[in-house]
Image (tube, rainbow, N blue to C red):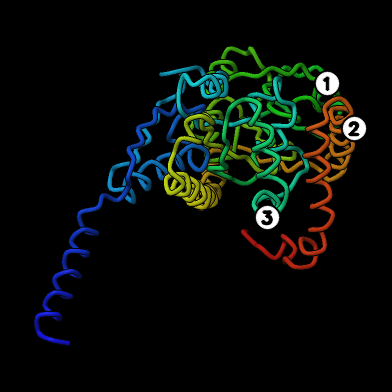
Amino acid sequence: MSINRKVSALSMAALFCAGLAATPAMAEKVRWQVPLAFPSHLVGLTTPVKHLSESLAAISGGDVQLRYYEPGELVPPFEIMDAVGSGKYPAGYTWVGYDQGTIPALPLYSGAPFNMEPPAYLAWYYEGDGKALLEEIYAERNIHPMLCSIIGPEGAGWFKQQISSLDDFQGLRIRFAGIGGKVLEELGSSVTMVPGAEIFQSLERNTIDATEFSQPAIDKMLGLDQIVKNYIMPGWHQTLTTSHLLVNKDVWNKLEPETRALVEMGCESATLKGFAQSEWAQPTALRDYEKEGVTAQVLPEPVLRELEKVTNRVMDDIAAEDEMFKRVLTSQREFMKHHAIWHGKGYLPRDFYQYN
């Protein structure tokens, strides 16, 4: 090759590289207002939205920006789905179980009684039917949903008296969410749904006798241990809790494929980050409870077995009335049955984990 041709080739290469360097990280600008269902500081539950927004802004060079707003600043927590579906806001970050009155299948995604633990749920969601079924559910609402957080089991709640049998649920005025609330109604409890920000006052004013909300570390942030000292575990009613980023489907479809992929990867990253944050925080919270005189009662196995029987009855009744609930429940049960051989034989029994 002649010197002139070499110079020409090098010049073209230099121009090509300069062009690449001048190309912005993203071809389109995204500026979304995102209302939250829960305060942004709740570890594992809503802190992933901070990780999501910061990661998207960093990797896109500032082109993709999600600005999140605390509960009630834009819309009440219970109205996020409608606000996103109607296009009032492009996206929302929420606990989808709030909309069980409209879509009965959603509690199976937000956290159901005697269901999978997080690792199995993630397998079902990403590799099984979970993701596709959820997208089908929300398509009718003009929404594209994305799993954007998962944490482990909740506490079963704060009760003024210990629970030794199912009879102890009779007559309780209790704040309880999801399908677990329907189970307690079957057992004679008076169940109400109170937003997280109002639970402390409801307990303090004796409007309710008992409540569940979330995991030990999050309940501590709400100060529930300042009023009630009897903490019930494990979270039979929610073996996991998820949060989802809901995006208006028209907004989603107009995005470039690269941008959609970026947001999806951002939610996958946020899900992992939130789970790690949550698992790190829970043992500290439980040990602090012990120091402060909070009794963490573990429900006797016979009580749990009876609760499971009632739960299966309740879910079968819902499935008989709602086809989508039946489809999701059947898919989950079939996967749990298939996964059980690994769950039962592959992991060490829990008592190999010693803490005292």
Residue drawn at the location 25% of the way across and 52% of the way down: 23
Using the image, determine if residue 76 lies above or below residue 5: above
Crowding around mark 3 (Cα neighbors within 10 Å: few <14, some 14 to 19, many 20+) is few
Q: With 35 as the anchor, is 114 left or right in this view?
A: right
Q: Residue furthest bottom?
A: 1
Q: Which mark is residue 313?
A: 2
Q: Nearer the viewer, residue 345 or 26?
A: 26
Mark 2 → mark 3, Cα distance in angstroms:
28 Å
Residue 166 image point, x, y percent: 86, 30
Residue 36 picture location, percent across and down: 47, 28
Q: Is 64 on the left-hand or right-hand side of 308?
A: left
**Quadrant housing the C terminus:** bottom right
At horizontal 87% and vertical 42% (from top left) the residue drawn is: 305
Question: Which is in the foreground here, disc 2 or disc 3?
Answer: 3
Secondary element at tag 2: helix
SS at mark 3 in the image: helix
Q: Classify 214 as above or below 60.
A: above
Residue drawn at (46%, 46%), measured in percent from left and top?
Answer: 257
Q: State if disc 1 and disc 2 touch (CB < 8 Å).
A: no
Percent position (x, y) of residue 245?
A: 52, 36
Cα separation between marks 1 and 3: 41 Å
Label whose residue precedes the other's in the sequence (1 or 3): 3
Q: Which residue is mark 1?
A: 170
14 sits left or right of 254 in the view: left
**CA neighbours of label 2 inside 10 A, class few (<14), some (14 to 19), many (20+):** some
Q: Earlier in the sequence, mark 2 or mark 1?
A: 1
- In terms of sequence position, does the residue under pointer 2 or pointer 3 come before the other? 3
Looking at the picture, which amino acid does disc 2 mark? Arg
Q: Amino acid at mark 1?
A: Gln
Q: Which mark is residue 328?
A: none
